[in-house]
Amino acid sequence: MARTIPPLGEALVKEIEAAWAQPQEDWARKRLLVVRLIAQHQMTTEQIAQVAGVSRKSVFNYRDLVVTGGVPALLKRDWAGGADASGARGGGGGIYPATGGRSVPAGAGRESVD
């Protein structure tokens, strides 16, 4: 049986819309998109996940975050995210042509010399 998502409430929807109107990082914009789509009650959770490019579990996680802690809880994350496509986060990893475009962790492919 599919889990239904109850309405978010008028005050919370206004808070979401106010945050949407502000400049946001891409990850924050994606989370706001998910809860905005939930508030519209026009899509299933599977459709919301597909449109936003997240998992169904993330749809429920973002909904729970915004309901329990408001928009500030939704827009807070405890880590800075992974490396970008260039590997610029200092991890030394990145995307290499020899791997068919797959990301490679730092130090991968290095052979020890004995």
Image (tube, rainbow, N blue to C red):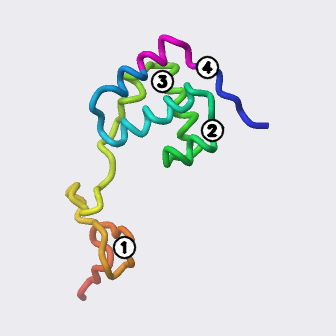
Span shown in magenta: 8-15
Q: Which mark is residue 7?
A: 4
Q: Residue furthest top?
A: 11
Q: Residues within 10 Å of mark 2 (few under 14, many from 20)?
A: many
Which residue bears the numbered disc 3? 66
Q: Is residue 72 magenta?
A: no
* Residue at image point 54% right, 28% down: 63
Q: Taking 13 as reference, is 52 above or below it?
A: below
Query: N-terminal of the two: label 1 or label 2?
Result: 2
Which residue bears the numbered disc 2? 45
Q: Which mark is residue 101?
A: 1
Q: Residues within 10 Å of mark 1 (few under 14, many from 20)?
A: few
* Residue at image point 50% right, 30% down: 35
Query: N-terminal of the two: label 1 or label 3?
Result: 3
**Kind of residue indicated by mark 1:** Gly
Q: Secondary structure at mark 2?
A: helix
Q: Are marks 4 and 2 in contact (CB under 8 Å)?
A: no
**Residue 113: quarter of image:** bottom left
Q: Nearer the viewer, mark 1 or mark 2?
A: 2
**Kind of residue indicated by mark 4:** Pro
Horizontal and vertical percent position of residue 70: 44, 19
**Residue 39: quarter of image:** top right
Horizontal and vertical percent position of residue 111: 29, 83
**Kind of residue indicated by mark 2:** Thr
Q: Residues within 10 Å of mark 4 (few under 14, many from 20)?
A: few
| Spatial CA span between label 1 and label 2 | 31 Å
**Kind of residue indicated by mark 3:** Val
Q: Are marks 3 and 2 in contact (CB under 8 Å)?
A: no
Horizontal and vertical percent position of residue 4: 70, 29
